[in-house]
Amino acid sequence: MLLGYHYDSEQEILLLSYTTGSGILRLKECVSDGSGHLEPAMGEHEVVEINGTDGKFTSMFDMNMLWWGSDGIDYSLSGKIEQDELVMVAESLV
C-alpha cells in the first residue's frame, strides 16, 4: 500500500514509500545528471544485475539498499526486505 509520496520539481526527484509485511519500502527516482549521486556513499557494495544493467546492493544499519540507473533515470530502493526481493521489485520498474 502506498504510504506517501513527494515530488521535487526543481530537482526532478520522486520519492515513494510503501508499506510491506516487514516494514516500509522506499523508492527514489530522479533524472540522472551522470554524477552517480544516488550511489552508496559508504560501505562495501555488491554488483547485481537488473534486467541486464548493473546495480549496486549494500546492507547497513539493518537496512538493505539497491541503486541502479536506466534510460536517464537513477533509482534507489531501500527497506528491510531481502536482496532477491529488492532485485525483483527493481526489475518490475524498468
Image (spheres, rainbow, N blue to C red):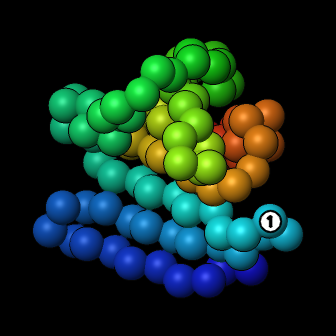
Q: In the displayed orientation, state which residue is furthest to the front.
A: 61
Residue drawn at (42%, 28%) of the image: 43
Q: How many numbered circles does the render carry?
A: 1
Residue at position x 63%, y 56% in the image: 79
Of 39 and 74, the residue lying toward us: 39
Residue 7 visible from this viewpoint: yes
Which quadrant holds residue 15?
bottom left
- Quadrant of the snapshot with the N terminus: bottom right
Q: Secondary structure at mark 1?
A: loop
Residue 60 at x, y percent in the picture: 53, 41
Residue at the disc numbered 1 = 22
Q: Residue at x 66, y 80 (%)?
A: 2
Q: Is residue 16 left or right of residue 88?
A: left
The reply, left or right, for residue 59 in relation to residue 37 is: right
Judge from the rendering whether residue 87 lies leftward or rightward of residue 85; answer left or right. left
Measuring from the top left, give residue 30's x and y in whole percent: 34, 52
